[in-house]
Amino acid sequence: MTTVLYLASVIALWGVLSLILDREVIDYPDAGPLLGPAIAAVACVVTGIGVARGRGPSTAIACLIGSYAAMLAVGALGYTITRGSPIWMALAAAHLAISPFVLGAAVLSALVVLGATVVRRVR
């Protein structure tokens, strides 16, 4: 249930950031419709693993780094497959690395894992 809450929170965060910044979540018009959902899905997988193994703040930090790296990897690889040229991988990774959407989703992943750990300890 926590991973579903995380996915809903990521969608809401990306929507609010998109409105505030007046920017698309995936800035590349030729990226296709599945790149954003693929990035969100891999972040959900990392967050789900973090919640299942939640041992405290160290797991939350590992989840932050893991979800950030996984989102960069899937985004860069997905865009490279769409473009058909390996040179785009480095450019897409660099663009996604400074994206507020990716950074926000990674921080949110750590907060969800930390919150689930706290709730687990209270019970």
Image (spheres, rainbow, N blue to C red):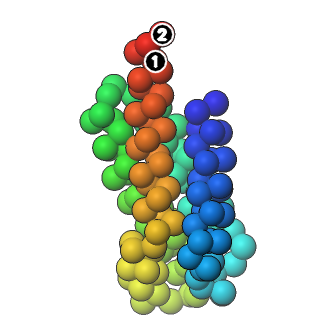
Residue positioned most to the right: 33
Circle 1 residue: 120
- Give the left or right position of residue 15, taking residue 111 as reference: right
In the image, is 66 to the left or to the right of 116? left
For image coordinates 56% across by 61% down, the residue present is: 39
Q: Residue visible at 45% across and 73% down?
A: 99
Whether tag 1 and tag 2 are in contact, CB under 8 A, the answer is: yes
In-front residue for pair 120/68: 120
Q: Position of residue 37 (x, y in %)?
A: 65, 61
Q: Secondary structure at mark 2?
A: loop
Q: CA distance from mark 1 to mark 2?
A: 5 Å
Neighbour class for label 1 at 10 Å: few (<14), some, many (≥20)?
few
Q: Name above or below for residue 101 compared with residue 32.
A: above
Q: Position of residue 79 (x, y in %)?
A: 55, 78
Locate residue 77 relative to residue 31 in the image: left or right. Answer: left
Q: Residue at x 63, y 39 (%)?
A: 5
Mark 1: which secondary structure?
helix
Q: Is residue 27 above or below residue 50?
A: below
Which quarter of the figure is the N terminus placed in? top right
Which residue extends farthest left?
Answer: 58
Disc 2 residue type?
A: Arg
Q: Which mark is residue 123?
A: 2
